[in-house]
């Protein structure tokens, strides 16, 4: 190539250089055009992706706010006056010993405040408690026969008998069903109904949305409270809540 260029006339060398410059310019222009198309393609993909994401978000139902979750539902298990100025929601685990210890306290509060306090029980079976879900299903099945609270009380009263067993014993719950006057055969059928577990899981899901750390967890008039260390402390919290509503 060098030998050939040396044999060219001055005019031919100038024309060759011009041709080389033009070819280089065309290569540069092609590269720039390719970059522009690539950039446009990336932007288009990004816009489509974002648009798709926005579309997906727009179709998702809004996450329930704590206020909505803490509204008393039609399927909640309640005790007391529905128009009471104070509402106490408890997320409980029937196998939880602390829940068992608070149970008589909550009963006493309900008795003392009467129509001024509505008590709501919600399930929050802990995964580490193997008997908690079967106990919740027993309570829910009893509820179908109008005796949720009777089973609720029996489960806590007999907690030492069935709690923390390595393997759940369904016959114990059948015995409790008979003890509180349920139709035992219906109870046995209902306990196996998948819709009961779905109902328990709905409570647990609401607890997770509220970031319930464990059991028992109490919400008083829509606000999470630290578990009171005494009956008197609990009583004062409820009295304060009632005064705020009046």
Image (cartoon, helix red, strand yellow):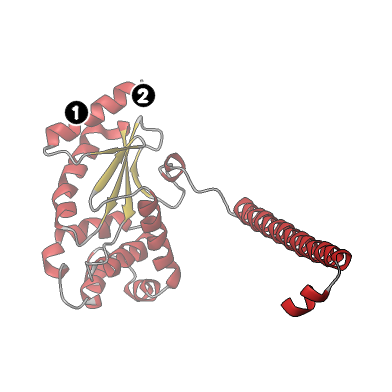
Which quarter of the figure is the N terminus placed in?
bottom right
Give residue 199's position: percent from left, percent from top: 42, 61
Asked if one can make out residue 145 in the rendered structure from this viewpoint, the answer is no
Q: Quadrant of residue 84?
A: top left
Q: Which residue is mark 2?
A: 245
* Callout count: 2
* Left or right of residue 82, residue 40 in this image: right
Q: Quadrant of residue 167?
A: bottom left
Q: Say which of 114 and 95 sits in front.
A: 95
Asked if one can make out residue 189 in the rendered structure from this viewpoint, the answer is yes
Q: Quadrant of residue 106?
A: top left
Establish if 240 lies above or below 146.
Answer: above
Q: Say which of 146 and 199 sits in front.
A: 199
- At numbered mark 2, what does the secondary structure look like: helix, strand or loop? loop
Establish if 100 lies above or below 170.
Answer: above
Within 10 angstroms of label 1, few (less than 14), some, or many (20 or more) residues? few
């Amino acid at each position: 190539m060098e030998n050939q260029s040396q044999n060219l006339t001055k005019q031919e060398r100038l024309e060759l250089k011009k041709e080389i410059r033009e070819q280089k310019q065309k290569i540069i222009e092609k590269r720039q055009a390719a970059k522009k198309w690539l950039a446009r393609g990336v932007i288009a993909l990004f816009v489509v992706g974002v648009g798709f994401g926005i579309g997906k978000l727009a179709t998702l139902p809004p996450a329930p706010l704590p206020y909505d979750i803490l509204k008393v539902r039609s399927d909640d298990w309640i005790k007391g006056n529905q128009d009471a100025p104070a509402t106490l929601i408890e997320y409980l685990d029937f196998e939880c010993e602390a829940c068992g210890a608070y149970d008589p306290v909550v009963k006493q509060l309900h008795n003392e405040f009467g129509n001024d306090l509505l008590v709501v029980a919600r399930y929050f079976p802990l995964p580490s408690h193997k008997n908690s879900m079967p106990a919740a299903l027993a309570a829910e099945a009893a509820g179908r026969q109008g005796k949720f609270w009777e089973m609720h009380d029996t489960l806590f009263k007999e907690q030492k008998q069935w709690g923390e067993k390595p393997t759940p014993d369904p016959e114990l719950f059948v015995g409790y069903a008979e003890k509180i006057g349920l139709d035992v055969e219906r109870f046995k059928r209902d306990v196996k109904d998948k819709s009961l577990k779905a109902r328990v899981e709905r409570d647990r899901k609401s607890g997770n949305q509220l970031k319930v750390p464990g059991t028992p967890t109490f919400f008083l008039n829509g606000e999470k409270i630290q578990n009171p260390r005494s009956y008197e402390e609990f009583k004062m919290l409820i009295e304060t809540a009632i005064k705020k509503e009046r």
